[in-house]
Image (spheres, helix red, strand yellow):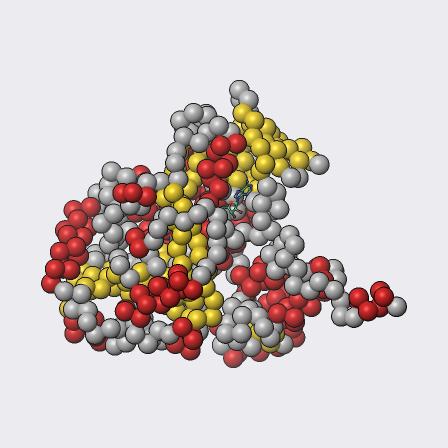
Amino acid sequence: MSQIETEVLIVGGGIAGTAIARELSRYKVDATLVEKGVDFGQGITKCSSTMMCQGSNTLEFRSEYHNSRLVWAGMPLMAPLCQELNIPLKRIGSLELIKNQAGMRRPEKMIRRFNEYRGKYIPPEVEPIQLIDRETLRSWEPNLNKQFIGALYDPNIAVNDPVRLTIALAENARQNGVNILLETEVLGISAGIDTFDVQTNNGSIRCRYIINAAGEYIGKLAQMANADDFALYPVKSYQAVLDKKIGGLINHMVFTTENGMVSPTIHGNLFFGISPGTQRLGKAHDHSTDQKLADAAMKHAQELVPDVSAKDIINSFVGFIVFRNFEIGWHECTVGVSRWVPRFINASIGFPGICAAPAVAKEMVEILTKNGLRLEENPEFNPYREAMPDFSELSDEEKKKLIAQDPRYGHVVCRCETVTEGEIVEAVKRGARTLDGVKFRCRPGMGRCQGGFCGPRVTKILARELGVPETEVTKKGGESRNLIYKSKELLEAQQ
Ligand SMILES: Cc1cc2nc3c(=O)[nH]c(=O)nc-3n(C[C@H](O)[C@H](O)[C@H](O)COP(=O)(O)OP(=O)(O)OC[C@H]3O[C@@H](n4cnc5c(N)ncnc54)[C@H](O)[C@@H]3O)c2cc1C
């Protein structure tokens, strides 16, 4: 068991924790990030609907709320961040659909409010939202339900891959000097006068500041330090991913507050899900899905896009949005120093936390400075990160060049997503230790067959690259092994 000392301890390797770690690496500070999982972004971040730059078109966002100000501040930061880290970001725009004349009131109010806030709270570079009529809607989205009479168009909405962004933030933070410990779970915290003593499954850590970015578990972590001066409400949301073959059905994120949304993803699939407004409080940490939830979400999605069908679902899951004040909406976040325990800082947005993460990270620097941490710029900070090759996106010329350099790029392992052995090996070099680790870095298993064909091959490559038997390869760490025995091993043992 090790004992380490660090100035700032960040707990949680989701979007919030890794964005903060990367922001802190701009300064000469001894920072450590601990994540209990075997990889980054596998908590709530993995469940997100992947919408970026939200905030212009949501009445629930108001200037008096810290949450809204962070979301707005994050809007112009997302594109440059993705550029530095080499993460694709695609603007698709969103359409909030209007059913009838009475339904016009809300968008009109939003436009008035947007105009009032732009330049004051909403950064001036954020593009205006506007109403579009029935004909324009038809021409932009011919596969929509014909009942809608128009829409509120927000051109700012973009999609990216939040898990890849989280992994990229962690890679860049590590490259710039942050100490990162995976499979390290905080189990207890004792607050001293100037320091915290933190117990983990891998030894103890002494630190001066704790940043609690534990997502769904921020309440539990705060409780360990007697800093739980807030109440949280976990709201369960259902999401489903549809086959790429119907990926062209719509071009924008389309939604209503009652129906939830249907949207293209950055990878060419469609996504649908029930929005927070239509959800009920969930039993904390119950990640099960059931037919009732799935049927309700499908019915809502078909009311928007009738050709969406259950036979096209290739995966579905639930995630928890951690609301601060469920009764009145998604207004407030849990970002700031605990009122009860000095130097214990919470960092959870709830919704939409990916959009807000770059602004939360910047605010953490201010909070730490105000609370006595001296932050001197790190002259060696390098904001750039090289992307992994994405074979399926390359031109024929680029493919040939890559194969000539490394023939493993000529061996396609996952046929659904055209993922090569070369990419899987690169994913392992960059830190993938599990089937999910490989899947979230380069997508084998994300297609129609969900790993049915490529799973055994990826297992073989992972085992070879990690130097372990295939039976030791797991889906996501811990006991999640896919192979329990070597073929005929039991028979051999009996002989
Ligand atoms: C269905 C759904 C759709 C969403 N859609 C969007 C969207 O389109 N756009 C958007 O911006 N936001 C969206 N959100 C919100 C967004 O996903 C979250 O706000 C964000 O991912 C939260 O990130 P986080 O880092 O705070 O938490 P997490 O991603 O959960 O990270 C917390 C990490 O802390 C670790 N941890 C917990 N306890 C401990 C411990 N004791 N020791 C060590 N590690 C610990 C966990 O393992 C986890 O990895 C959505 C959320 C949901 C549920």
Q: Quadrant of residue 293?
A: bottom left
Q: Is residue 115 visible?
A: no
Q: How many marks?
A: 0
Measuring from the top left, give residue 322's x and y in whole percent.
40, 45
422 lies above or below 51: below
Q: Nearer the viewer, residue 288 or 353?
A: 288
Extreme residue toward the right, this view:
495
Drawn side of residue 188 relative to residue 481, left or right: left
Measuring from the top left, give residue 104's x and y in whole percent.
14, 59
Please tell me which residue is depicted at 57% across the width and 70% down the height of the picture. 451
Q: Quadrant of residue 308?
A: bottom left
Drawn side of residue 343 relative to residue 207, left or right: left
Q: Is residue 148 visible?
A: yes
264 lies above or below 223: below
Please tell me which residue is depicted at 14% across the width and 65% down the height of the picture. 100
Q: Nearer the viewer, residue 210 or 215?
A: 215
